[in-house]
Image (tube, helix red, strand yellow):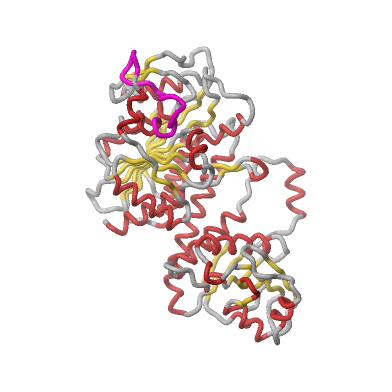
Amino acid sequence: MEFSIKSGNPEKQRSDCLIVGVYESRKLSSSAEALDAASGGFLTAVLKRGDLDGKAGSTLLLHSVPGLLSERVLLVGLGKERELDEKHYRQAVKAAVKAVNSCGATDAVSFLADLSIKKHDIAWRVAQHAEVVLDAVYKFDCMKGKAAKDKKADAPKGIKKLTINVVSRADIKPAEAGLKQGQAIGAGVSLAKDLGNLPPNVCTPTYLADQAKALSKSHGLEVQVLDRPEMEKLGMGSFLGVAQGSRQPPKLIVLQHKKGKKGQKPVVLVGKGITFDTGGISLKPGAEMDEMKYDMCGAASVLGTFKAIAEMGLPINAVGIIPTCENMPDGNAIRPGDVLTSMSGQTIEVLNTDAEGRLILCDALTYAERFEPAAVVDIATLTGACVIALGHHLSGLFSNHDALARELLAAGEGAQDRAWHMPMLEDYQGQLDSNFADMANIGGRAAGSITAACFLSRFAKKYDWAHLDIAGTAWKSGKEKGSTGRPVPLLTEFLRQRSAKV
């Protein structure tokens, strides 16, 4: 997708399609009013016939509107004017690009960024516009065969070029900055989606390591990949315990983005990378087990975020740590009742081998200490309990530092990739007590997402730490099955805000 920024009068634009908004009760936006005047009231006449009432997300495509140079005009419903907020704005952009993408137009000019959204400037509106467009046109079809590709070749080509209009020339510079940000986040989200959507026979730990190396080469990042012998020397008995049931070799991937001031402490992102999770000896039910290829979406979000911040050139020091392996029920796999010794020296009684994510993350959190981090955020599809608690709209946020939690919450709001601050009181820690080790790896059914966070907190006492449980937000099931790329927008905005302060 090719983007550009322009400031011009709607009625003078020559394009395959112009995109303008209409509020409920058929009230025209300012750009739609300009088109209506140039066409001798054509838009007003169409709306009076009842073809579009302006409800949020509705669209109406018009051809050969008199008095205009463009072939088509797309009217997009915005809902009630006083209720136009971040959600409805994104909804309008998504509806618009989907409609234009299927109508045969290959280029378009959008006037939706001209709309007024409370508390948000032109840079935000343009960034969101670009990000939503890239999300809406994303397709994952690289694994399909010749018949599907032939069918795709016969389908409408879709939009290739989008110009985002701004009201005045003074808006062009901040709009271009917003466009760069939106495109970078969109690229990071697409990478995270691609990795999540790949089948587990392709996206193995070695494949993830190779992708990290490729990203490092193309975006000027530093990368190191630790193999089993190196992890054994470090004493990562918890991580390697999970990996021992798989024929796929485990990897510990370390990425570094060094664009901050010399001596600036880095922010560390730790992403869970279970490339397939059978549950191990505590085998999962067969239904929907295919979706356990998404158990590496935490890792994918770290790689996507590093792609985004590298493309944005954020002046910050950041480290990405990805422990990655499979969880398989092999004859050599760990068993319920086994005791593992973590890199920290703390011992763990394994009561359920399907609570494996925390077993690989705990060693990665200990490894993070060597970077003397300003803050550490781990991202993991960790617990089904979080899905029960928050559904598929909000990621669960846990932290040992309230100020860090507030930063992440604010970043999620700004990026429209929201999280919810969950409790992690000392009262819950007792559920992890074990008769045979320093702790158990599960705390029972009650408050499962909280006790999982409590487990991780025991390995994050030497720095400010937060945990994002993305089990409900990392992918969609059903007809729209696929990776969402979340929480790349939240993480990127968090790092962007951090970079502005240091």
One can see residue 7 in this view: yes
The residue that appears at 52% across and 47% down in the rendered structure is: 393
Asked if residue 354 lies left or right of residue 33, the reply is left
Residue 344 drawn above or below residue 171? above
Q: Position of residue 328 (x, y in %)?
A: 53, 21
Report the front residue among 108 and 116.
116
The residue that appears at 62% across and 73% down in the rendered structure is: 22
One can see residue 223 in this view: no
Residue 433 drawn above or below residue 55? above
Asked if residue 310 lies left or right of residue 502, the reply is right
Total number of numbered discs in the rendering: 0
The residue that appears at 44% across and 47% down in the rendered structure is: 419
| Range shown magenta | 434-451
Quadrant (top left, top right, bottom left, bottom right) of the N terminus: bottom right
Residue 78 drawn above or below residue 234? below
Q: Magenta stretch: residue 436 in it?
A: yes
Q: Position of residue 268 (x, y in %)?
A: 34, 42
Residue 124 drawn above or below residue 28? above
The residue that appears at 59% across and 38% down in the rendered structure is: 198
> Within the image, what quadrant is residue 58 found in?
bottom right
> Within the image, what quadrant is residue 33 found in?
bottom right
> Within the image, what quadrant is residue 162 found in?
bottom right
Q: Magenta stretch: residue 67 in it?
A: no
Q: Position of residue 145 (x, y in %)?
A: 72, 40
User: Chief secondary structure of the magenta span?
Assistant: loop
Asked if residue 52 lies left or right of residue 183, the reply is right
Quadrant (top left, top right, bottom left, bottom right) of the C terminus: bottom left
